[in-house]
Image: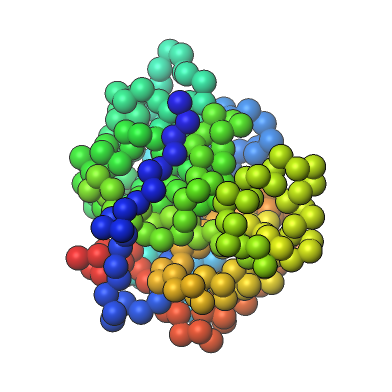
Amino acid sequence: MTYRPPRPTDAQRVVWPDDFGTRFTVFVDVEEEFDWTAPLDRRNRATTAMAAFPAAHRRFVERGVALNCMIDYPIATDPASVSILSSVVEDTRSEIGTQLHAWVNPPFADSAPPGSSYAGNLPYASEAAKLETLTRAITAAFGRAPRAYRAGRYGIGSNSFALLAGLGYRIDSSVRPGYDYRSDGGPDFMMADAEAYRSEGIVELPLTTVFTGRARAGGGRLYRALSHVPKGRGLFARTGLLSRIALTPEDMPIAAALEAVAVAAGEGLRLFNLSFHSPSLAPGHTPYVRDAADLKRFHAWWTTMLDEFDRRGIRNASLDEIIVALG
């Protein structure tokens, strides 16, 4: 059964304190390397791209930006990666969180149901056991229990929030508004929006997706309808009617992302949630950074985006600052 997050009530919406201002935060999916075009395989556990993480972290520190490092089991159990990330959090603002890649995270069942790469599709006991195993591994590696979670492949389900609350988590960031993963057995976020909300003891901080263009009021409903029209989405994007823009340097042109920031800021969004995958920091590990030219564009995207936030007076928020603001 497809998971769709219920639309939050007005009472569930987060009301940020006035002194919080308008802020942005950066979540990094810190994970192993694998072929994004091949079937998922639990044997893929290489973490060589982590060698590029310290230099990238320095770039963000120089701009006053904290990284919320959402790590999965291969990273949490790799001594070299743990050492790198232990140095990262010495900046006192970056923090280690949890990312569950169900296919590489024990315990492993003898058989897996369809769509089991999305942790939220797993039976309750299996999702709980994997979450507990990963949370223990991260706590042991870093001496502190993680407070924020992201499901790998954005694969939360109907049991996820209650399980997270039971393990002491405060934040989830698995909802990706405007995206629909039903064709692969995943959740449907098409009708979700970018505003933070509370549910079952957890605060959801959706990744920021913005619909831009003259028909943006149609939002996810119109975007979904266009999927049934041959080349409909492309036509609407090319003519400036409707585009779906996620705030990430991965396959998202900076001009489109800047337009999305302008639209969201104009509509009063108080917390922008940006993201990227750690293997993109080294060429050849993701479809987004295949060579040195792609990597140069990746870093330039961040420079331009951070300049734009500075220009607008939108400051970075660490995970700790977000949790304090939530009360």
The mark tally for this picture is 0
> Which quadrant of the figure has residue 326?
bottom left
> Which quadrant of the figure has residue 96?
bottom left
Question: x and y percent of residue 187 in the render?
Answer: 49, 37
Q: Is residue 9 visible?
A: yes
Residue 318 higher or lower than 203, as above or below: below
Question: x and y percent of residue 195 in the render?
Answer: 41, 61
In-image side of 37 versus 124 (left or right): right
Residue extending furthest toward the top: 110
Please identify the quadrant where the C terminus is shown: bottom left
**Closer-to-camera residue (189/132):** 189
**Residue for point 35% across, 79% down:** 21
**Residue for point 79% across, 55% down:** 235
Residue 149 higher or lower than 271, as above or below: above
**Closer-to-camera residue (216/130):** 216
**Residue for point 62% across, 45% down:** 224
**Closer-to-camera residue (184/295):** 184
Question: x and y percent of residue 317 in the render?
Answer: 37, 71
Please identify the quadrant where the N terminus is shown: top left
In-image side of 87 versus 18 (left or right): right
**Residue for point 59% across, 69% down:** 260
